[in-house]
Image (tube, rainbow, N blue to C red):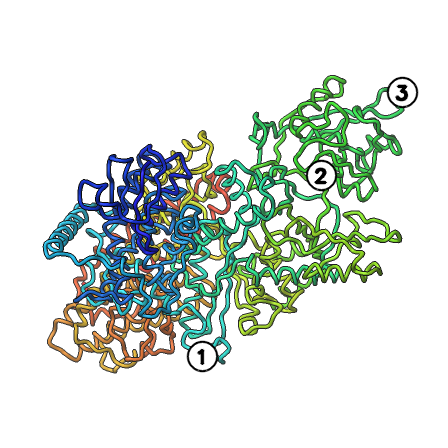
C-alpha cells in the first residue's frame, strides 16, 4: 500500500497540490506512475520508516520499503493520471512543463512574499510594497495568456493549472481584494473555474476569496511561517536568481524583433507602485528608442479602469447632477456570449469608442454601456456539443434543469471572454454596468414586456409557416438563415445524411386531369419533389389561355386518394415553365398565401425532425431527402416523370447547424407589427429619429411598409422561457381547448397571477384551473429589442433610467438595421412612449483588400488580434487546421493566405488598427481592408513617438508651459503658421465628429502631425532652439508644447494608448490638470492656439530661409509625389479598362473611386509643399 503524507493545515498549498493530483488520479485511469491509489496520512512519516531525516511534505512512499518521493512538483506529477501529457501530446507536455516551472520558480515566491507581510508575518528588512509589486509582475504573463485561453494548456485542467492555482491560493484568500481581482480579470476567471472543478472542490471545499477586510490577528497559522534560512541558503538563492536574470536577458537580446517592428528588442514596462493595484505606469525614465505597441499598450487600460475614468460619475457628485455640456449615452450592440473578436467587432468598437471618448473629453456626462447577449441557439449548440464530447449525453438525457445548470456553468467559465477582448481594443466601457440578457434585472423586463403586449393583443398565438431547422428541432429567425446561391446542379452535405443531397435542379412531372377522355395532363415543375405528397391544388394564371378550359376541373394525385382542384391566381408567372404551379400550403410561403386566398387545406407531411408523416407507404417515415429519391423513382415507374434540368436557385441553410431550412406549419407566438412599424416609420419622416447615412432611410421605410408579423417562439431550453400558460379548466361546462386557440392561453408575471387571470376569464374558481407553461423560449432578438431600457431596470424607476433613457446614439452595422434597430425603435415607442435614441449611425461591412466578403474558405478572414500582435504565415495556416473547414477547403484557404499574406501579418498594435479602421469608414461604402495600410499607421505611431522624443529634448528638463495655449505676441511667422495649422486641424476634427465623417478627422490629424509638424515645423526648430535669441527660443518651445499637447488630445479618441503614453511624459500647464488624457478637455477652436487661421498656402519661405535645407526637403517631397502619381496612374488605368464597369463589382468600383480621390488629394498637398520650397531656392 502506497502512502501519501501531507500536512493537515488548510493553507499548506504544497500538500493541497498533491491531494488534488491524487483526486484526479482516482477519477482517471489511475496515477501516472502506474501504482495503486495511495492512502492519505495527515502527518509526517515516522522516522523509523525512512532511512534519512524526514522529508518535507508532501511525501509519497511507494509501498513498504519502496521508493520515496517528496516535494509537491514530483509527487503531483506521479499522482496525476496523464503525467505531463494530456490533450495535445508532446507539444502540450512541453507547454505544461513550462507553466509548472513558472509556477514553482515565479508564482510561489511572489505569492508567499506578498501574502505573509499582509498577514503580519513580515521578516526584518522586508518591504511589503515591493513584495506586492513582485506579485503583480508574476501575474502579468498569466493574465496575458489567459486572455484567450480557458486553461493554461488544453481544454481541461492539467498539471500546469494545478501548480499555478495552488501557488495562488494564499493571495486569493488573503491579499487580492475585489478591486485587485477586477484588474486581474482573466486570472480570477481561470482561478474560479479551476477551483470549481469536482477534484479541486473535493480537497479545497468552497474557496472564500479575500473580501478586503481582515483583522491583523487573523493569521493562517504557524505552519505557514517559512523556516528561517541560513546565510548559506540565502547566498545560494541570490546566485540562482542572478544566474536566471542573466539567462533571461541573454534570451531577450538574442530574440529577433517580429516582422514589421521598428527598432530592436522591445522595452519592458516598469511600474511605479503607490499600491499594487492602483498603479500608474512609469514614465519617469528615458523613452525607449523606438515605438513598441506591446510596450505602450501593456499598462494603461487597468489604470484607466481602476481610476474610474470610464464611469459617467467621474468628476461629478452623481449622474443626475446638472451638466450644461449635456449627456451622451450609447449602448453597445451586445455581442454573443459565445462570440470571439472579429473585424466587425473591431470596426464597431473603434468607431463607438472614438465617439465615446470625444464626448467624454468634451465634458459631457458620458456612458457607454456594455452588455452581452445570451445567444439562445448558438450557446445551446455549443453546450450540447460539449456535453456529447465529454460525457456522451444529449440535453434530453440530462433533463431541462440539469442542462440549464450546465449552460450557466459554461457561461461562468467562458462567457466573459469577449469582454476581455474588447478591453484589448481599448474600449472605454463602464464595466460596472455590464449586463447579460439573462440577468434577473433584464429577465424581469422581458417578462413585463411580454405580459403587457399579450394583454393588449399585440402578442398573439397562431399556426403559421416558420423557418424550421430539423437538426436544432426549432424555429429560427431570418438572420439565422444563410442563403447559398447555386448556379445549377450541386451536391450539398446535409446533417444526418451519409451521402450528399442534390440541389439546383428542376424536376417536371404530370398530373392527369380528372375525368379526361383524352388522357389530358398538366405538367408542373418543382425543386423539392418530395413536397408533392403535400400538394392540395394546381394554380394557373387567370388570363392564361392554355388553361381556360380547365376552370372547375381537378387533377388526380398519383399516390393519394384525393383530387387537386385547379385554381386561378394572379401570383402565377405565365412565362415560367408550363405556367402551372403545384400548391403545397404547409411547406411554402407563397403556396400558403394562395391557400389562404382559396381556402385550401394545409396538410403537413413532415414532423419536426424532417421525417414524412400523413403520407402513404412506402413514403411514410422516410427522412425528407430519402423521400426525394423515392418519390422521383415512383413517378418514373408510373410514367409521370417529364424531365429534369439545371436550375439556378437559393438554398436556405441554418447558419448554426448547416441544415437545410424547411418551411413548416407550427403554432407559435407572434408580435403584431403593423401599427408599431407605422410609428417607427413616421418618427424618421418627422425627423425625430435620424438615420445616417441617409441612403438607409429608403430601406427603413420599405421594410416598415412591408413588415410581417414577427415569430418570437423558439423551441429551445436556453433563453427566456415564455411566460404564457396553456389553460385546462376542470369544469364540465367548459370544453377543452386546443393549442392554436388563443383564448386558452394566459400570460402572467408569475404562475399565481396567470391562474387568477384564467379563473376570471372562464368564470371559475382558481382551484379549477390547471396551467402548463409553454416549453418554448423567446427569440433572442426580443430581449435584444428591449436592451436600451432593460439595462436600466425598466419598468422600475431608477436614476440611470431617468438620466440615460432615451439614449443619444445607436451605432452598428447596416446588416442588422431591421433585425435589431427597427425592433428597438418599435418596442421602445410601444412600451415606454419614447424613442430609444435620437440618431442611428450605420457603418459598412469589412471586406478584404480585393473587395471580397471575408470567408474562412477563401482564407481571407482576419482576426484583429493577429493584426494587433502579428502572426506568421504558418500561424495563419495553423488556425485553419483548428477551424471547422472541410479538408478540401483548407488547401484552398491556405493558398488564399499565401497570396494575401506571404510573410504573415506584421505586428501593428491596437492604436494603428483603430486609426486605420476609422480612416476607412467612408459613409455608405464597404471597407476593403488592406493590412499594409494598417502597418502604415503603425509607422505613423513611430513618427509620433520620435517627434515627441525629439520635442522633449528640445523643451529641456526645466521647461514650464504657460498657463494657457494663447500666443504671447512674440511668435515668429513659422510659429504663427504652425499654430494656425493646428487650429485648422482642431476645427476639422470637431466638425468631423459632429458629422460622423471619420476619414476627414483622421486625414486632418495625420496631415498635421506628418506633413506640417514633423516635415516642416520640427525642421525649422533645430536652429532656433540652438540659437542665441532666447526670446525666440522660448516662444518656439511654448508653441512646440502647444502642438504636442493639443495634437495628442486630438488623436486620443482614435489612438488612446500611444497618446496617453506620450501625454504622461509632458509637463502640465497647471497642478490641477486631469490625471489622464482620456478625461482632459478635447481641443476646441475657441482655445486660442492661433491669432488667426492662416492658409496653408501662406508664404512662410522668408522665415524658413536658412533654417531648413530646401533641396533636401524637395527631394523627399518629390519622392512622395512620384509614389502618389504611380498609385493614381494604376487606379486610372484600372478604371479605364473596357470591361471594368461590367465585370468589377459595384462596391469595388466605389472603393477604387475613393482611393483615387484620396490619392489625388495627397498629390495636391505635396504639390503645394513643393511650390513652397521651390520659392526658397
* Mark carried by residue 317: 1
Residue, disc 3: 517
Residues packed near mark 2 inside 10 Å, few (<14), some (14 to 19) or many (20 plus): some
Q: Are marks 2 and 1 in contact (CB under 8 Å)?
A: no
* Mark carried by residue 745: none
> Vertical placement of 697 versus 1038: above or below?
above
Residue, disc 2: 588
Residue 740 or 66: which is nearer the viewer?
66
User: Residue 655 lies in what quarter of the image?
Assistant: top right
Measured in 3D between alpha carbons, the distance from the residue under mark 3 to the one under mark 2, in whole angstroms, is: 33 Å
| Residue drawn at (83%, 58%) of the image | 762
Q: Secondary structure at mark 1?
A: loop
> Vertical placement of 182 versus 628: above or below?
below
Residue 478 or 48: which is nearer the viewer?
48
Residue 42 or 1061: which is nearer the viewer?
42
Which of pointers 2 and 1 lies earlier in the amino acid sequence?
1
Tell which tag, 3 or 2, sits nearer the viewer: 2
- Residue 191 visible in the current orientation: yes
Q: Would you say 931 lies left or right of 622 here?
A: left
| Residue drawn at (71%, 34%) of the image | 606
Q: Secondary structure at mark 3?
A: loop
Query: Could you say where residue 446 lies in the image, as x and y percent from the top left?
Result: 62, 60
Residues packed near mark 3 inside 10 Å, few (<14), some (14 to 19) or many (20 plus): few
Measured in 3D between alpha carbons, the distance from the residue under mark 1 to the one under mark 3, in whole angstroms, is: 93 Å
Tell which tag, 1 or 3, sits nearer the viewer: 1
| Residue drawn at (70%, 20%) of the image | 633
Q: Would you say 157 lies left or right of 614 here?
A: left
Q: Would you say 468 lies left or right of 582 here?
A: left
Farthest residue to the front: give it: 48
Amino acid at each position: 500500500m502506497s502512502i501519501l503524507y501531507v500536512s493537515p493545515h488548510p493553507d499548506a498549498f504544497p500538500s493541497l497540490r498533491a491531494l488534488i493530483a491524487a483526486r484526479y488520479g482516482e477519477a482517471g485511469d489511475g496515477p501516472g506512475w502506474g501504482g495503486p491509489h495511495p492512502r492519505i496520512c495527515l502527518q509526517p512519516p515516522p522516522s523509523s520508516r525512512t532511512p534519512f531525516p524526514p522529508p518535507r511534505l508532501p511525501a509519497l512512499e511507494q509501498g513498504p520499503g519502496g521508493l520515496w518521493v517528496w516535494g509537491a512538483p514530483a509527487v503531483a506529477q506521479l499522482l496525476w493520471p496523464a503525467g505531463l501529457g494530456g490533450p495535445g501530446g508532446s507539444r502540450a507536455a512541453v507547454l505544461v512543463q513550462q507553466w509548472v516551472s513558472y509556477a514553482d520558480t515565479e508564482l510561489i515566491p511572489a505569492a508567499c512574499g506578498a501574502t505573509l507581510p499582509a498577514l503580519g508575518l513580515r521578516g526584518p528588512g522586508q518591504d511589503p510594497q515591493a513584495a506586492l509589486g513582485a506579485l503583480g509582475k508574476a501575474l502579468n504573463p498569466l493574465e496575458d495568456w489567459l486572455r484567450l485561453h480557458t486553461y493554461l494548456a488544453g481544454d481541461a485542467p492539467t498539471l500546469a493549472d494545478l501548480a499555478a492555482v495552488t501557488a495562488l491560493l494564499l493571495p486569493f484568500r488573503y491579499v487580492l481584494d475585489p478591486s485587485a481581482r477586477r484588474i486581474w480579470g482573466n486570472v480570477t476567471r481561470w482561478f474560479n473555474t479551476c477551483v470549481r472543478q469536482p477534484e479541486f472542490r473535493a480537497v479545497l471545499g468552497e474557496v472564500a476569496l479575500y473580501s478586503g477586510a481582515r483583522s491583523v490577528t487573523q493569521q493562517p497559522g504557524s505552519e505557514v511561517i517559512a523556516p528561517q534560512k541560513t546565510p548559506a541558503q540565502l547566498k545560494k538563492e541570490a546566485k540562482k536568481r542572478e544566474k536566471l536574470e542573466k539567462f533571461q536577458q541573454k534570451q531577450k537580446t538574442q530574440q529577433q524583433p517580429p516582422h514589421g517592428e521598428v527598432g530592436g528588442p522591445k522595452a519592458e514596462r516598469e511600474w511605479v507602485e503607490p499600491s499594487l493595484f492602483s498603479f500608474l505606469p512609469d514614465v519617469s525614465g528615458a523613452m525607449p528608442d523606438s515605438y513598441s505597441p506591446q510596450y505602450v499598450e501593456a499598462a494603461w487600460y487597468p489604470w484607466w479602469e481602476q481610476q474610474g475614468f470610464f464611469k459617467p460619475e467621474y468628476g461629478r457628485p452623481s449622474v443626475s447632477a446638472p451638466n450644461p455640456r449635456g449627456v451622451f449615452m450609447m449602448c453597445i450592440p451586445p455581442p454573443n456570449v459565445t462570440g470571439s473578436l472579429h473585424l466587425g467587432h473591431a470596426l464597431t468598437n473603434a468607431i463607438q469608442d472614438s465617439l465615446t471618448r470625444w464626448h467624454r473629453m468634451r465634458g459631457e456626462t458620458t456612458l457607454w454601456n456594455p452588455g452581452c447577449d445570451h445567444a439562445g441557439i448558438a450557446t445551446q449548440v455549443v453546450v450540447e456539443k460539449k456535453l456529447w464530447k465529454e460525457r456522451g449525453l444529449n440535453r434530453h438525457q440530462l433533463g431541462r434543469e440539469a442542462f440549464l445548470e450546465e449552460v450557466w456553468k459554461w457561461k461562468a467559465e467562458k462567457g466573459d471572454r469577449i469582454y476581455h477582448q474588447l478591453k484589448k481594443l481599448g474600449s472605454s466601457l463602464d464595466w460596472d454596468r455590464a449586463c447579460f440578457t439573462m440577468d434577473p434585472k433584464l429577465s424581469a423586463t422581458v417578462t413585463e414586456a411580454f405580459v403587457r403586449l399579450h394583454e393588449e393583443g399585440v402578442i398573439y398565438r397562431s399556426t403559421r409557416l416558420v423557418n424550421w431547422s430539423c437538426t436544432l428541432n426549432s424555429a429560427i429567425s431570418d438572420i439565422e438563415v444563410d442563403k447559398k446561391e447555386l448556379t445549377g446542379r450541386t451536391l450539398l452535405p446535409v446533417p444526418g445524411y451519409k451521402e450528399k443531397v442534390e440541389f439546383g435542379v428542376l424536376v417536371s412531372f404530370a398530373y392527369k386531369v380528372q375525368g379526361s377522355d383524352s388522357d389530358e395532363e398538366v405538367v408542373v415543375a418543382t425543386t423539392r419533389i418530395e413536397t408533392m405528397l403535400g400538394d392540395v391544388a394546381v394554380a394557373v394564371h387567370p388570363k392564361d389561355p392554355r388553361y381556360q378550359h380547365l376552370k372547375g376541373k381537378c387533377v388526380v394525385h398519383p399516390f393519394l386518394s384525393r383530387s387537386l382542384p385547379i385554381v386561378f391566381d394572379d401570383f402565377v408567372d405565365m412565362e415560367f415553365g408550363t405556367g402551372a404551379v403545384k400548391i403545397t400550403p404547409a411547406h411554402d410561403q407563397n403556396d400558403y398565401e394562395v391557400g389562404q386566398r382559396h381556402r385550401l387545406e394545409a396538410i403537413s407531411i413532415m414532423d419536426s425532425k424532417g421525417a414524412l408523416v400523413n403520407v402513404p407507404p412506402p413514403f411514410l417515415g422516410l427522412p425528407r431527402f430519402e423521400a426525394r429519391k423515392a418519390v422521383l423513382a415512383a413517378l418514373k415507374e408510373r410514367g409521370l416523370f417529364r424531365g429534369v434540368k439545371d436550375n439556378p436557385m437559393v438554398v436556405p441553410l441554418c447558419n448554426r447547424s448547416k441544415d437545410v431550412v424547411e418551411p413548416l406549419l407550427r403554432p407559435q407566438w407572434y408580435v403584431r407589427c403593423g401599427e408599431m412599424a407605422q410609428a417607427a416609420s413616421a418618427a424618421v419622416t418627422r425627423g425625430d429619429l435620424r438615420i445616417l447615412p441617409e441612403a438607409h432611410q429608403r430601406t427603413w421605410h420599405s421594410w416598415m411598409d412591408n413588415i410581417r408579423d414577427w415569430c418570437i417562439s423558439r423551441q429551445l431550453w436556453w433563453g427566456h422561457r415564455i411566460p404564457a400558460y396553456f389553460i385546462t379548466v376542470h369544469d364540465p361546462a367548459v370544453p377543452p381547448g386546443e393549442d392554436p386557440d388563443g383564448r386558452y392561453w394566459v400570460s402572467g408575471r408569475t404562475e399565481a397571477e396567470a391562474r387568477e387571470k384564467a379563473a376570471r376569464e372562464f368564470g371559475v374558481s382558481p382551484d379549477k384551473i390547471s396551467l402548463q407553461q409553454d416549453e418554448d423560449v423567446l427569440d433572442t432578438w426580443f430581449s435584444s429589442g428591449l436592451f436600451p431600457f432593460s439595462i436600466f431596470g425598466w419598468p422600475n424607476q431608477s436614476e440611470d433610467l431617468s438620466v440615460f433613457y432615451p439614449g443619444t446614439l445607436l451605432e452598428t452595422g447596416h446588416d442588422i438595421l431591421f433585425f435589431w434597430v427597427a425592433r428597438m425603435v418599435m418596442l421602445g415607442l410601444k412600451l415606454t412612449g419614447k424613442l430609444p435614441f435620437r440618431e442611428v449611425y450605420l457603418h459598412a461591412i469589412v471586406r478584404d483588400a480585393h473587395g471580397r466578403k471575408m470567408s474562412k474558405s477563401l482564407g481571407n478572414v482576419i482576426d484583429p488580434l493577429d493584426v494587433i500582435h502579428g502572426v506568421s504565415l504558418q500561424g495563419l495556416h495553423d488556425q485553419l487546421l483548428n477551424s471547422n473547414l472541410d479538408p478540401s477547403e483548407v488547401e484552398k484557404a491556405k493558398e488564399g493566405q499565401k497570396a494575401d499574406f506571404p510573410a504573415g501579418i506584421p505586428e501593428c498594435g491596437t492604436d494603428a488598427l483603430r486609426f486605420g479602421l476609422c480612416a476607412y469608414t467612408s459613409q455608405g461604402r464597404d471597407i476593403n481592408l488592406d493590412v499594409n495600410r494598417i502597418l502604415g499607421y503603425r509607422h505613423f505611431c513611430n513618427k509620433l513617438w520620435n517627434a515627441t522624443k525629439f520635442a522633449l529634448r528640445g523643451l529641456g528638463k526645466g521647461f514650464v508651459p504657460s498657463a494657457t495655449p494663447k500666443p504671447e505676441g512674440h511668435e515668429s511667422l513659422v510659429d504663427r503658421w504652425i499654430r494656425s495649422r493646428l487650429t485648422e486641424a482642431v476645427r476639422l476634427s470637431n466638425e468631423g465628429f459632429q458629422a460622423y465623417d471619420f476619414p476627414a478627422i483622421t486625414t486632418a490629424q495625420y496631415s498635421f502631425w506628418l506633413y506640417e509638424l514633423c516635415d516642416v515645423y520640427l525642421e525649422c526648430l533645430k536652429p532656433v532652439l540652438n540659437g542665441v535669441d532666447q526670446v525666440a527660443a522660448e516662444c518656439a518651445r511654448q508653441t512646440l508644447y502647444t502642438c504636442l499637447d493639443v495634437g495628442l488630445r486630438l488623436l486620443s479618441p482614435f489612438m488612446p494608448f500611444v497618446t496617453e503614453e506620450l501625454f504622461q511624459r509632458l509637463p502640465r500647464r497647471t497642478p490641477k490638470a486631469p490625471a489622464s488624457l482620456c478625461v482632459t478637455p478635447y481641443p476646441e477652436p475657441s482655445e486660442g492656439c492661433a491669432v488667426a487661421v492662416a492658409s496653408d498656402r501662406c508664404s512662410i519661405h522668408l522665415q524658413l530661409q536658412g533654417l531648413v535645407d530646401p533641396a533636401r526637403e524637395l527631394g523627399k517631397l518629390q519622392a512622395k509625389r512620384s509614389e502618389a502619381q504611380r498609385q493614381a496612374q494604376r487606379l486610372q488605368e484600372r478604371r479605364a479598362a473596357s470591361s471594368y464597369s461590367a465585370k468589377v463589382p459595384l462596391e469595388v468600383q466605389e472603393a477604387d473611386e475613393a482611393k483615387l480621390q484620396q490619392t489625388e488629394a495627397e498629390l495636391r498637398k505635396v504639390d503645394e509643399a513643393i511650390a513652397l520650397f521651390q520659392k526658397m531656392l
